[in-house]
């Protein structure tokens, strides 16, 4: 087997090397690129190069090639590296054909789930192919179209025949994705989920900032928070970092390193758990989002019927919509942020000032804790102030 470009990339857990893999999004983009090349060249190709958002170039073998005068179909096999991913080894197919309109139209086929509930990254009724994979597919196909000087467009159908069965091993149906898996990935690369490695990386990054005399940190759990900061808040991101699910560990490391304050900026889906004193927000540790949202809404005066509706929600975005429709959002968020303030400060003690700003992907800013405004002033972007 040839080299795929990931041989030198790994994380360590103890004395063990855990090798990286690539996402279903990378598989879909690579298959689409290869199929488009074959459509124009009229001959089979057996490997394709793919530049990932992570900056790593993959060299991926092409399988299951079918060429006709009207379309080309091929597949790339998912390799999750040493991550225990249920999609490891499945084939992700792309079927491409020419269309007249100058666009890259992306469709979901067999084994790609359909979004059935609000609050997910794609609208209801759309194939569960997330934003970054869609961008990767589009850019990969457009690269070929430019080189071939084709004025029309390409229709790309992504399918994962094994996805129907694999989805039964995931939480997709509960989350509102029916009929298959999601095509995922924000970097194109799968990093094995070693908790120790992730926490160590948080420590290393924070230690570097502390060495630069940074006293106050702006922290988001992940990409949603980072996007919200860039698009909605005029804050200096040079002192920002991510903490993933490790809220408690992050606070502990900050105390050890003498950091004076932290402002968390988080999607409500993560920090609703902190309102219940949960400091590791990964779903494998806890998933009490609906119960905590409901408890806060009852404190804010919600009826029994509203409470029942909230308990039946799958996503916090859906719950926020219910609260907004019932004119309960403001009071409920006040209850939630008060609880978050209590648990964050119980964890941090007197040496570390800590606050949080919460947002929703659909509704934007939702609320903030007691010290959030004071801490936000530490990160004001002077050019945008």
Image (spheres, grey):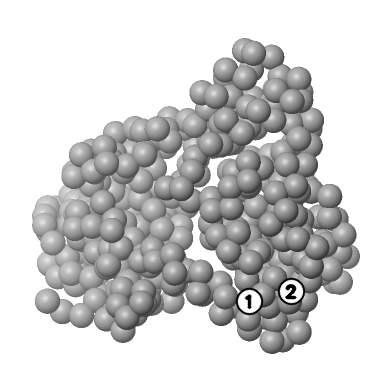
At 65% from the left and 52% from the top, the residue drawn is 266
Residue 14 lies, with reference to residue 252, above or below; the image says below
23 w.r.t. 48: above or below: above
Q: Which residue is drawn at 23% across and 70% down?
A: 60
SS type, badge 2: loop
Q: Nearer the viewer, residue 279 or 94?
A: 279
- Judged left or right of residue 190, residue 213 is right
Tell me which label, 2 or 1, sits earlier in the chain.
1
Name, please, the residue furthest toward the bottom: 211
Residue behind mark 1:
206
Q: Name the residue under label 2.
A: 259
* Residue 303 at x, y percent in the picture: 69, 14
Residue sitting at x 79%, y 37%: 334
The Cα atoms of the two marked residues, 2 and 1, are separated by 9 Å
**Tags 2 and 1 touching, CB below 8 Å:** yes
Image-quadrant location for residue 119:
top right
Callout 2 crowding tier (Cα within 10 Å): few <14, some 14–19, many ≥20: many
Q: Is mark 1 on a helix, strand or loop?
A: helix
């Amino acid at each position: 087997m040839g080299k795929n470009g990931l041989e030198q990339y790994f994380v360590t857990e103890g004395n063990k090397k855990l090798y990286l893999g690539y996402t279903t999004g990378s598989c879909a983009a690579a298959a689409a690129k290869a199929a488009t090349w074959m459509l124009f060249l009229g001959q089979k190709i057996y490997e394709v190069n793919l530049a990932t958002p992570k900056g790593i170039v993959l060299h991926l073998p092409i399988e299951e090639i079918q060429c006709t005068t009207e379309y080309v179909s091929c597949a790339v096999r998912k390799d999750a590296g040493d991550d225990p991913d249920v999609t490891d080894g499945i084939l992700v197919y792309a079927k491409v054909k020419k269309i007249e309109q100058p666009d890259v139209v992306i469709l979901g086929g067999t084994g790609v789930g359909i979004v059935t509930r609000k609050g997910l990254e794609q609208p209801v009724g759309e194939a569960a192919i997330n934003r970054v994979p869609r961008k990767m597919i589009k850019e990969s196909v457009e690269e070929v179209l430019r080189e071939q000087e084709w004025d029309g467009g390409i229709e790309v159908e992504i399918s994962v025949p094994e996805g129907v069965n694999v989805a039964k091993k995931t939480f997709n149906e509960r989350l509102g994705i029916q009929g298959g898996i999601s095509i995922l990935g924000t970097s194109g690369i799968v990093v094995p989920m070693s908790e120790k490695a992730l926490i160590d990386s948080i420590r290393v990054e924070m230690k570097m900032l502390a060495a630069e005399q940074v006293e106050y940190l702006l922290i988001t759990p992940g990409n949603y928070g980072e996007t919200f900061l860039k698009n909605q808040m005029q804050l200096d991101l040079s002192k920002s970092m991510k903490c993933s699910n490790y809220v408690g560990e992050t606070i502990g490391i900050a105390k050890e390193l003498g950091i004076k304050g932290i402002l968390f900026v988080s999607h409500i889906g993560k920090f609703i758990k902190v309102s219940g004193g949960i400091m590791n927000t990964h779903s494998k540790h806890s998933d009490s989002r609906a119960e905590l949202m409901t408890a806060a809404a009852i404190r804010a005066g919600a009826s029994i019927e509203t409470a029942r509706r909230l308990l039946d929600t799958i996503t916090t975005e859906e719950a926020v919509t219910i609260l907004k429709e019932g004119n309960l959002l403001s009071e409920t968020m006040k209850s939630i942020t008060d609880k978050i303030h209590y648990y964050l400060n119980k964890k941090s003690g007197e040496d570390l000032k800590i606050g949080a700003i919460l947002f929703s992907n659909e509704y934007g800013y939702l609320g903030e804790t007691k010290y959030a405004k004071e801490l936000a002033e530490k990160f004001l972007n002077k050019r945008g102030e």
